[in-house]
Amino acid sequence: MSDLDTEVLPLPPRYRFRDLLLGDQSFQNDDRVQVEFYVNENTFKERLKLFFIKNQRSSLRIRLFNFSLKLLTCLLYIIRVLLDNPALGIGCWGCVKQKYTFNGSSSEINWAPILWVERKMALWAIQVIVATISFLETMLLIYLSYKGNIWEQIIRVSFILEMVNTLPFIITIFWPPLRNLFIPVFLNCWLAKHALENMINDFHRAILRTQSAMFNQVLILFCTLLCLVFTGTCGIQHLERAGENLNLLTSFYFCIVTFSTVGYGDVTPKIWPSQFLVVIMIGVALVVLPLQFEELVYLWMERQKSGGNYSRHRAQTEKHVVLCVSSLKIDLLMDFLNEFYAHPRLQDYYVVILCPTEMDVQVRRVLQIPLWSQRVIYLQGSALKDQDLMRAKMDNGEACFILSSRNEVDRTAADHQTILRAWAVKDFAPNCPLYVQILKPENKFHVKFADHVVCEEECKYAMLALNCICPATSTLITLLVHTSRGQEGQESPEQWQRMYGRCSGNEVYHIRMGDSKFFREYEGKSFTYAAFHAHKKYGVCLIGLKREDDKSILLNPGPRHILAASDTCFYINITKEENSAFIFKQEEKQKKGQGLYEGPSRLPVHSIIASMVAMDLQNTECRPSQSGGGGGGNKLMVPTENGSGSRRPSIAPVLELADSSALLPCDLLSDQSEDEVTPSDDEGLSVLEYVKGYPPNSPYIGSSPTLCHLLPVKAPFCCLRLDKGCKHNSYEDAKAYGFKNKLIIVSAETAGNGLYNFIVPLRAYYRSRKELNPIVLLLDNKPDHHFLEAICCFPMVYYMEGSVDNLDSLLQCGIIYADNLVVVDKESTMSAEEDYMADAKTIVNVQTMFRLFPSLSITTELTHPSNMRFMQFRAKDSYSLALSKLEKRERENGSNLAFMFRLPFAAGRVFSISMLDTLLYQSFVKDYMISITRLLLGLDTTPGSGYLCAMKITEDDLWIRTYGRLFQKLCSSSAEIPIGIYRTECHVFTSEPHDLRAQSQVSVNVEDREDTREVKGPWGTRARPGSGHGCHTSSGDPAEHPLLRRKSLQWARKLSRRGTKHTGKVPAATEWVNQQRLSLYRRSERQELSELVKNRMKHLGLPTTGYEDVANLTASDVMNRVNLGYLQDEMNDQQNTLSYVLINPPPDTRLEPNDIVYLIRSDPLAHVASSSQSRKSSCSNKLSSCNPETRDETQL
């Protein structure tokens, strides 16, 4: 059997190689018939037609030859005219020549000079040969184009002209006397024009390129004008042989003057045939030229709409980027242009916009500005067409930005369009860097090949989640990703605006450590040591680095990380180091034998652009602590060792190399048995049920795995419903659950996969278990099974069907027990017929909730950033009006952050995802910005990289005094890097100075008459040093608000009686009384709102004990509102609170009570595997003296 399988039979004779070469000889004896197939008809006519007409390349050659023949005939005619002299005699070939002189007084015309010309024998021979070739070619084309109707071919103008210019020459061969007969050969110019048009069309078809209609039309117009002038010149010159015998130059001059409607009159036709020809030519010009100009203007307008082409020469000599969008709005365009051209090295770049829609009127108006008209080119076209990509010269582009249309109702469809555009660009120009913006996270993996991708919903939900635990994270990130010079608000009289505007100029920069003056001296030192000393010396904040052999960026890798010269350092500063000038103001003075600088001296080196004021080194430098275990429980606790009470407490220095026994973060992942064994009574056994692990079900492909607090067993879907009980529990409202912490409520239209990124940062492993807030998802539509499967593993995550504009839904989801409410922009309302009206419903709903629940912290997402001025709107607010004027002034000065001084944005209470568009634009210059932003937001978790968190400054922490000393304290005790401050101030805003004086006088009188000891603590104000308009409230007194309300009513009555007696004398007091009356009216309105809420709660069967209306707010509740940065017009219409973010403030910035400091805390898992044994030994002694809370959070 195996032999049969392996045996190879010989090939039959017909398949041998010899037969393949010589042919199959046995085919003749075969019965088969060989059939040849032809693509075209195998006839002589069809082969000629294929060569002369159908084939583009051969047809192009034929037309080019024909065009050359016509030009040759015109040239021969001009030569004949130049050689002909009528004065020498006129007559037929071989006849006696007769001389002719023109008689102007006679009306008779001698036709002999018109009918006969002088033609040399050689010239006649050449013209006959050319005419014969042209005649034969024309007849052949007529034969090939014949389709049954011969008259259709004969009556064509081109055929008639061809016969007029060729047949007479052929006849002269057989009849010699006619060789001097005049033949209008100059009419061949029209045939040359026709041949040129066909040749251009064949040329574009042959090279497979689309012809430019604009170029063709301009060419046709030019040829038409040339033919008209040439025909008129030759015709008038020949007819005037019977008149004044004009030469060609004079005839050309006459035609130009006539067609241009100038008409000098110095040259005029003398006989009626030439005059008649002029009339005919003018008539033809009046008919033909307007038609040509109309077509040209139409094409020009269409080209203006479509944008034309980006020239190949410019693409090869200049640099350009391409912006692909579905529809271009003025806000999107200005954000891109302002951010893109904010970088100095991009000033010479061109921006080519490729958009399928017609240019908007506002966009057209902006692009006509000289600043943009020379650098921005608008092309109407689609990225899916290679022709349009070729017009934009995509293959030569430096980058291509593909943006999604977020205003579409169907955002999934918008993502699909973006994906196709990205694929088309990658297919056409594979070497062009791609910067893609995607809306939904589940579509992100389709564009994973792009160089940089920003997912809108991922960033949005993660940022909104961090806003609940780190106030104003959205403002912090927005300021970091915007390019600013830090000059905003510097002309403002308000101190906070100047400081806020200056600190907003801080951005993230990078530099190689070995090339840096900032960090070069810290080679071989720990990261924490370098971060502190660079901030102390230069005012820069070192936040992370990247190893040369590793592509991952690490934020605050901790003190165990030793810096190398090849590391790339990432730091926050006003400007990058390369643009900084270093000036040594004075020499450093050191005391011999000591490591301390003299007291009054300042640091010698600073960045001029940053303008940072260095710290007093005596306040920051100190000798090493003598006791090894100081500060066991609280990291910012006042040191008690070494010295008398009158001496200012010192701070331990930051060590060059890490001492693991002195670092607190090593406890973050220590044994949690202490929390588990001793749970509080309120928590019950809930803490025991939490485990740390990775979520088993990710809702989409591409989500970064994050270690989180999880349930050991997935919760049933029925238990996720907050407002309905099930067989597992009977709870039907938030009160019944008995949550220890306040709720976080998220209002969204649908449970999109991006909502998963809201939950993950709030359940990350580095959050303390005691800090976990219950999360309630208030959804307009019921979530699908896939989403519930993804969230059922997280503890204390619930959902409820309802809307944010329904009071019953808000009460059922537990809004009275909530600390934060996040209102997400709804997809169905993102587009509106009128621009900027998409946020109308959201703004009104949030304003209603603000009135109903004044103690609630509300974070709102808007579609348009310009609508944030309507948040917490008050019509008669002079300060808001002043901020509006400031915003307009900053916009006129060219600021990219004109909206930054709006109070809701500064306080982090409003956010628009369009503010993060600059993140994608900035990544063109800083390719690391997307990675750093994702690390800060917790979207990516790189091993060894830190995370963003916040801590609060209390009265007990003010012994540190300055931000620089706080930097040293945190670096030395817990290896945490502060990057900014969230500050809250209370301000007294008045429109007139005497109003403030009158109010202060009234306040003094009231304090004299009433006992205000209970109110003076929490409600009184403490003036800031050096500021007359800012104050900070102090907490600690349990006075209740009804007492304040009762006293205010008494004050208002007395002031009212006092004001009626002295109306004419004290107008300011009268105005203040009116304001007080209005305030009382508003308070009565708030009482009505409070009653409305209580009635709805009773109707729903909810307990009203948890609801505290404005009239029952305690002083501590009001202080919480102050800390949250909300306006307190409920209490005092002239007193408002301001909250704002200070990024990397100067080291000598004074700390204030209730400041919230942004920290980058090192990763507690970074060295668990390598140093678990040493960590256990070094931390065993600290666990006995540390409060368990200090292991999971920073306590101040």
Image: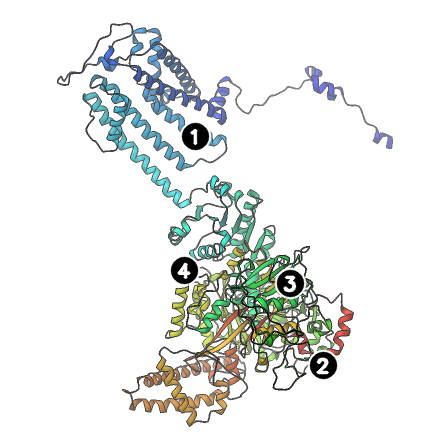
Where does label 4 land, which residue? 835
* Residue 351 to residue 722: above or below: above
Please report whichever mark, 2 or 4, sits nearer to the chain's N-terminal start: 4
**What amino acid is labelled 4 in the image?**
Asp
Please report whichever mark, 3 or 2, sits nearer to the chain's N-terminal start: 3
Labels 3, 2: front one: 3
Where does label 3 land, which residue? 521
Q: Position of residue 978 (x, y in %)?
A: 59, 70
**What amino acid is labelled 3 in the image?**
Glu
Mark 3–mark 2 CB contact (< 8 Å): no
Where does label 1 land, which residue? 200
- Quadrant containing the N terminus is top right
Disc 3 crowd rating (10 Å Cα; few below 14, some 14-19, many 20+) is some
Farthest residue toward the left? 105
* Residue 209 to residue 825: above or below: above
Say what secondary structure mark 2 lies in: helix
Q: Position of residue 132 (x, y in %)?
A: 39, 14
Where does label 2 land, which residue? 1185
Disc 1 crowd rating (10 Å Cα; few below 14, some 14-19, many 20+) is some
